[in-house]
Amino acid sequence: MSLLPLPVLLLECVGRWMVCSGQWWPVSPLVLSVLLLCLLVRAGTGTVSMAAEGQGAHCVVAEDVTAALDRIRALGLKPTPVHTSATMDSLAGNHLFFKCELFQKTGSFKARGASNACSLLPAGVAVVTHSSGNHAQALAFAAAATGRAAAIVMPKTAPLPKQQATRGYGAEVSLCEPTNEARAKAAAKLVEDMGAELIHPSEHPNVIAGQGTVALELLEQVADLLAARPRDDAPEAVASKKPRLDEASRPPIDVLVAPVGGGGLISGCAAYCKHHWPAMLVVGAEPEAMDDASRSKEAGSIQSNPAGKTTVADGLKTQLGPNTWPVVRDLVDNILCPREEDILSATALVWSRMKLQIEPSAGVGVAVALSSEFRRLLDSKFPDPQVRASLRIGVVLCGGNADPVKLAPHLASAPPFPEGALVNE
């Protein structure tokens, strides 16, 4: 691990004093940014492959994702299944492959990043994070699996089942006010008091590398599926022996759709996919109500969401940070933003037709894959009709930690998804 420069060490000391003394509010964005970056370096940024330095501002590269897979396997994380559905294919007009992270330990992909990060820490070092649910459970699990203490800051509005699950893995849970400032301040205090490492939900490079194993697995699994069955896409092209795409260099999937909140998942996936297949299309999916990533792409700089905005996809309320933004900026091709009613309709459709109890955050990716906007994007990127007809689309179902009692009324009132039609048509 590289040493922190003296000026940064001095800024860190000032930042820690201001946070602990409560004198931080006038310059909270600056203090938190400096302190977070310092903690990230201490928390293991140096453990990421040095190849990252050759990528300029990118903190994670494909080799980091490949190495992460072995580490998470050692902690008992198994490959999650890939499901297909003729109904969903018919509605989308594409061949869809759903990566079912709701079947991962702790109920979401978050266990991957937390496990990779904990695996790279020295034995006995405690970990701290702040999270409203999925990363909290994931880090609690990973800490227990690697024999270390975990302290988790959760907003007091976090669902009780998520609080209980986090405690169930052995973590200490501290509740705070439901604001980013309160969460960050409480986490920084725990890091100081415990001498612990901060494992940020989406900014930690080792977390990002772990999340990228979702794409690695998906590509390998779809390749196996295609090798085990007759080629049934674009049969007229097969009969005429005309290549639909360059099969020698064609990836198992042509387009990846992944949800975007803090950006850790799509950053890890994009880093892996674009390294091996630069022409693969990587598409982000975020709620229209929390469209900071989409607006950041348009503006060329990180944008934030106005205070008070919310979404049913509560796992995607976080925003891009200094580590995820450069990857999203450079490697994510497009970000599409479905409406709240479309998210609920898509979630309800997956529950009823695929029998998968996904959370609305996962439904955002489904809503994108079924949208007319996505179809127009594919038409523009793949104008050849034969190529367009044979496209294979990977969709990450990021988790299933929904409270069915609370979610069921929303799904029941969601507009029915019309058979044979696209959302937003």
Image (spheres, helix red, strand yellow):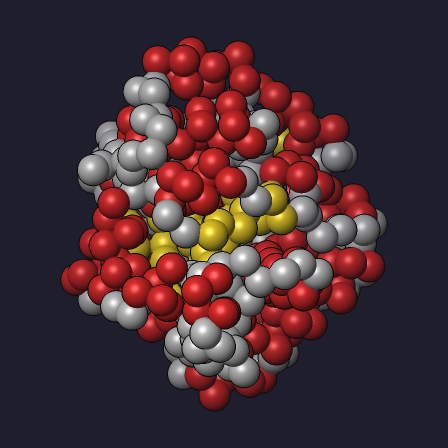
Question: Who's the residue at 24% across and 30% down the image?
Answer: 308
Position of residue 204 measured from the top left corner of the image (x, y, whole percent): 53, 61
Question: Who's the residue at 24% across and 48% down the image?
Answer: 373
User: Which residue reaches farthest front?
Assistant: 239
Relative to 129, residue 385 above or below: below
Count of numbered circles on the image: 0
Question: Who's the residue at 67% across and 65% down the image?
Answer: 227
Residue 267 visible in the snapshot: no
User: Which residue reaches farthest left?
Assistant: 299
Relative to 126, residue 246 above or below: below
Q: In which quadrant of the rendered view does residue 151 lie?
A: top right
Quarter holding the C terminus is: top left
Residue 418 visible in the snapshot: yes
Position of residue 16 measured from the top left corner of the image (x, y, whole percent): 47, 55
Relative to 27, residue 66 above or below: below
Relative to 166, residue 221 above or below: below
Position of residue 41 measured from the top left corner of the image (x, y, whole percent): 54, 69
Position of residue 9 measured from the top left corner of the image (x, y, whole percent): 48, 72
The residue lying toward the viewer, choosing from 395 and 262, is: 395
The residue lying toward the viewer, choosing from 151 and 282, is: 282
Question: Who's the residue at 66% across and 72% down the image?
Answer: 66
Q: In which quadrant of the rendered view does residue 279 lie?
A: bottom left
Quarter holding the N terminus is: bottom right
